[in-house]
Amino acid sequence: MTEVGLFLVLFVALFVGWTMGRKTPTKKNSPLKKSIPNDYFRGLNHLLNDQHSEAIDAFVDSLEVNSETFDIHLTLGNLFRKKGEIQKAINIHQNLLARPEISQREMRMVQLELASDFMSAGLLDRAGRLLLNMASTARKSEFQPKILTLLVDLYEFEQSWDKAIQIGSELVKETASKKEIKRLGHFHCEMAQELQKKEQWKPAYQEYKQALEVDPSCVRASIGAADVLKKQNRYRDAIKELKHAAEQDSDFVSVIIPQLKECYQRIWGSGGYIKFLQEQNEKKPSTTLIMALVEHYMENDREYAEMFLVEQLRKHPTIKGFKELINIQIADSQGYNQQHLSVLYELIDQLVQAKHKYQCRQCGFSGHQLHWQCPSCKTWGVVKPIHGLEGE
């Protein structure tokens, strides 16, 4: 058990003892109205024997439910849920609901905890029914934001994006939270992706636009909208969307370059594309930008391309850039020099391949693929390309 858990056990033990002591009459020769329950001593015995879970069970049994012990019962239920003992948490919370003496406010608090228990246990239908009932009966109450948040969590887990959007829109009106706004934007993007799979381009594009109305900073929506436009051969409009993505967050320039290059080649050639690369490289250089420019310069002047790469590496050193420099020099060398450079290139290439490309700014999770929702902390829109010596 963690130190926090052990502290709670000790706290409960002391609280129960204090509660029993308050109920002991102070007058001399007055008989005890109620003795300390045997469960309390049983709990102390378990605690002395390092049987923490059994100690908590015993202390719970010894605690009566009243205004003084309500918070303790609620805390213990949460502790059981966090420990993964969901059924015990459910039992405690259901026992609280069965008590006629708890107030309406306390009942709402317990129902919220019970809904969380059901979700943790995978009983999504029961959680959904409870939360929907609360949402309809507790409107404009202090608990409404929490109720809506749990409902959104539930529909997100079920990937019921239409319901998540409906409830999420209500939640945003209630709280105007940046986190919820961002999440709602990604729900629209998820809907758009499902429509894209069915080749329903117009409604998919509309979903991406709705995502941008909800969250103007949603890079995913701009990139997705460009992909839909590209599928419809609307390359000029796709270029506008991709450039907008670069304005929204320059960290994603490396992500949009392949699509942007294809779109320019379809209509205007490379002129506008190279201008865009040069402008972005002046603002915020990255390996992908530099490599794209080197590729273009190599078509006309290999020597200038190599000089440009060396100059950029002095200003913005990266392992990927160094690998490209070796690759250029391999083509210009012969004999043993070429063999040695080839070995060095292979070693660095293995190092580059082993390095992760994306990282969550929230929890630090890293991987080779771009996830719009972090697989670790489940936060939306926090995974970005890695920059620095080992990244972009």
Image: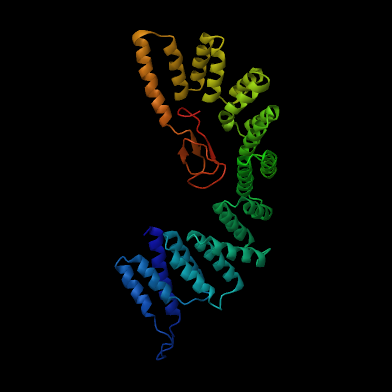
Label tally: 0
Indicate whether 28 appears above or below 192: below
Residue 350 in sight = yes
Q: Relative to 378, does residue 246 appear above or below in the rendering?
A: above
User: Residue at horizontal 65%, vertical 18%?
Assistant: 269
**Residue 266 in the figure: left or right of residue 159:** right
- Return the x and y of residue 229 as percentages of the image width and height: 67, 33
When the figure is inspected, residue 54 is found, relative to residue 252, above or below; the finding is below
- What residue is drawn where x is 53% and y is 10%? 304
What is the quadrant of residue 272 in the picture?
A: top right
Instruction: Please give the name of the residue rendered at 49% of the width and 37% of the height, measured from the top-left corner.
Output: 359
Give the image quarter of residue 23: bottom left
- Looking at the picture, how far across and down is residue 2, in whole percent? 38, 58
Q: Quadrant of the N terminus?
A: bottom left
Residue closer to the observer: 254 or 203: 203
Residue 364 position, x and y percent, is 47, 41
Position of residue 296 relative to residue 377, above or below, is above
Outermost front residue: 198
- In this orientation, which residue lies closer to the viewer: 48 or 86? 86
Question: Hey, which residue is sitting farthest left in the picture?
Answer: 49
Residue 190 placed where, x, y %?
Answer: 60, 44
How is colour applied across the structure in the image? rainbow
Examine the rendering and report whether any part of residue 72 can be seen: no
